[in-house]
Image (cartoon, rainbow, N blue to C red):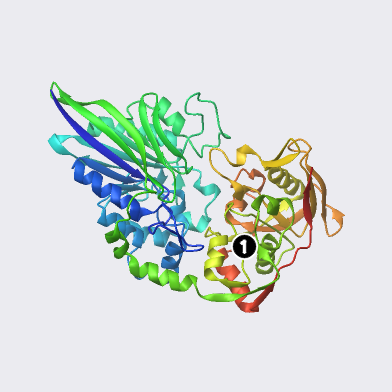
């Protein structure tokens, strides 16, 4: 009886990280594709039957990729250059692949030496818009591995409509079920791999729901209800997962290139047919690994250009616009968030604005501001929208934000629903143009105790034009009260560019706090 080992490696949610540095301060960090490259090369050296898949959210996420799109588009995409060099076998479309627009995505696909997959994102003819729902990898001794790509169908809730014009996002679960059956019937593979840019909606052990069942994440249902899957590669949630569900190995390799998923299959040939006799899922953390210098050299010119751009002086701050404690900064009005709202109000020419701190490493602006300071504080390529909402919507949105906090033994903590399984600090908004107070000692849903606009109470049926980022305006972050509201104005420029332009026009900006909101308990 003959046996053979197959290795499957997965990257996911790399988000433009190649170099092992923090672009906010250029300090070394243990992440990035150049460290992952060390693993890939070693695994390929050990086993020629190695398959490497990227599971999406590859081409967006750092100043490195942002500067490429702004200034170096005449060159090949550096992320694709590296994946080509590492001989990736396939890549799956992630939701952030659309952030820079369809032209950038299509260029990346065109330059790739490997197929991009997504069975459930369809063009106007009802066909997969990149042409390939799956690919077949031929291995030693005639072994066939099928890789099916699927993508969370929740993308229209976040993405700029212009970036996904003409596309239909079919239900990921239903598409997976249909294509797995079709692939088995047509290709008869020895190994069926589903690479799903989505995560898990339920506890992996109990099956209990862990989030609202919106369809954004369907991994648990996919692996429990669809027959014929030998491996489920996942992502999107930025979790570190390896294990088995329903006997099927699953992996999810964190984010920003901090880890790579590895699944080892043992196949045994019996009566002329290969069958999986064993499987082992695991994560390989890259923190302590050597960086692959040849990978860095491939894209060094891009990095050098980006670093020069990041250190360009933009302007100065009069006063203090730094953040020492992110929790305290979310409990009381502060100069940084007031400034970002001020930029949004100036651009949109409306009276009400909402924004957020996206994470807990935001440091604010020092007295002398560079592009590095802007992109390290405003990390997403958001655009702005002005939507028209009623007073009832506004109050519901504030109640959603107020649920961010909990009080335990007199101390304020962050509600675990905003931290587990994935940190979602970006889903707590702070507003300008209205005056409000949260009393977080009260039950969730009844915490907005004061709410006025221009000195008058907000009217439930009153109409208010509000500027916010495109993610929130589409209902992202469970702000469903904003979904499908009339769009009064669409501002297509990237928010970091708008901030830079605002500062450049003025030279000096002032740190102000009008204390229009506060949190009590």
Q: Nearer the viewer, residue 259 or 77?
A: 259
For residue 318, above or below residue 449: below
Q: Which residue is most to the top?
A: 271
For residue 254, above or below residue 5: below
For residue 276, above or below residue 410: above
Horizontally, residue 442 falls left or right of residue 304, namely right
Q: Is residue 111 visible?
A: no
Q: Which residue is most to the right?
A: 456
Image spot of residue 520 (x, y percent): 79, 46
Q: Nearer the viewer, residue 127 or 52?
A: 52
Residue at x 42% of width, y 33% of height: 174
For the image shown, how many numbered marks are present on the structure? 1
Residue with the mark numbered 1? 364
Q: Which residue is most to the front?
A: 288
Horizontally, residue 419 falls left or right of residue 451, namely left
Residue at x 67% of width, y 43% of height: 404
Image spot of residue 41 (x, y percent): 25, 49
Query: The C terminus lies in which quarter of the figure?
Result: top right
Q: Secondary structure at mark 1?
A: strand
Structural crowding at the residue carrying mark 1, measured as other residues with C-alpha within 10 Å and reported as few (<14), some (14–19) or many (≥20): many
Image spot of residue 261 (x, y percent): 35, 41
For residue 78, above or below residue 174: below
Q: Quadrant of residue 481?
A: top right
Q: Is residue 435 visible?
A: yes
Query: The N terminus lies in which quarter of the figure?
Result: top left
Image spot of residue 149 (x, y percent): 35, 42
Q: Nearer the viewer, residue 134 or 295?
A: 295
Residue at x 23% of width, y 42% of height: 50
Q: Nearer the viewer, residue 443 or 35?
A: 35
């Amino acid at each position: 009886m003959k046996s053979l080992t197959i290795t499957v490696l997965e990257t996911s949610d790399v988000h433009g990280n190649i170099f092992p540095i923090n672009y906010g301060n250029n300090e070394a960090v243990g992440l990035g594709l150049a460290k992952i490259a060390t693993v890939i090369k070693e695994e390929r050296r050990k086993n020629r039957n190695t398959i490497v898949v990227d599971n999406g959210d590859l081409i967006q996420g750092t100043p490195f990729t942002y500067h490429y799109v702004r200034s170096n588009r005449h060159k090949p995409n550096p992320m694709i250059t590296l994946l080509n060099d590492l001989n990736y076998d396939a890549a799956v479309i992630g939701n952030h692949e659309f952030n820079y627009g369809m032209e950038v995505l299509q260029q990346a696909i065109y330059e790739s030496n490997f197929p991009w997959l997504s069975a459930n994102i369809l063009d106007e003819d009802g066909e997969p818009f990149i042409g390939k729902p799956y690919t077949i990898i031929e291995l030693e001794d005639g072994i066939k591995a099928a890789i099916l790509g699927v993508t969370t169908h929740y993308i229209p809730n976040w993405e700029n409509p212009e970036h996904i014009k003409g596309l239909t996002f079919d239900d990921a679960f239903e598409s997976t079920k249909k294509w797995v059956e079709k692939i088995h019937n047509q290709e008869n593979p020895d190994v069926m791999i589903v690479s799903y840019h989505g995560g898990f909606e339920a506890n992996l052990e109990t099956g209990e729901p862990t989030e609202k069942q919106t369809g954004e994440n369907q991994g648990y249902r996919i692996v429990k209800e669809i027959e014929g899957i030998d491996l489920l590669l996942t992502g999107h949630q930025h979790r570190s997962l390896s294990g088995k569900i329903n006997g099927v190995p699953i992996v999810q390799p964190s984010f920003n290139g901090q880890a790579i998923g590895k699944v080892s299959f043992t196949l045994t040939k019996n009566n002329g047919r290969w069958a999986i006799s064993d499987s082992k899922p695991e994560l390989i953390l890259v923190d302590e690994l050597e960086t692959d210098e040849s990978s860095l050299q491939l894209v060094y010119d891009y990095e050098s250009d980006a670093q020069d751009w990041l250190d360009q002086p933009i302007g100065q701050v009069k006063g203090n616009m730094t953040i020492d404690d992110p929790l305290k900064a979310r409990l009381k009005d502060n100069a940084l968030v007031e400034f970002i709202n001020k930029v949004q109000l100036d651009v949109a020419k409306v009276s009400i604005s909402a924004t957020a701190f996206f994470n807990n490493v935001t440091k604010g602006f020092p007295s002398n501001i560079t592009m590095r300071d802007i992109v390290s504080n405003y990390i997403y390529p958001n655009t702005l929208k002005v939507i028209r909402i009623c007073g009832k919507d506004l109050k519901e949105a504030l109640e959603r934000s107020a649920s961010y906090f909990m009080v335990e033994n007199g101390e304020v903590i962050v509600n675990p629903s905003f931290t587990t399984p994935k940190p979602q600090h970006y889903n707590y908004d702070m507003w300008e143009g209205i005056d409000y107070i949260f009393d977080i000692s009260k039950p969730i849903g009844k915490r907005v105790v004061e709410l006025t606009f221009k000195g008058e109470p907000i009217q439930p049926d009153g109409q208010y034009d509000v500027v916010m980022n495109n993610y929130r305006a589409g209902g992202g972050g469970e702000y469903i009260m904003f979904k499908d509201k009339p769009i009064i104005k669409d501002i297509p420029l990237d928010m970091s560019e708008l901030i830079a332009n605002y500062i450049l026009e003025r030279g000096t900006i002032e740190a102000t706090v009008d204390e229009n909101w506060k949190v009590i308990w």
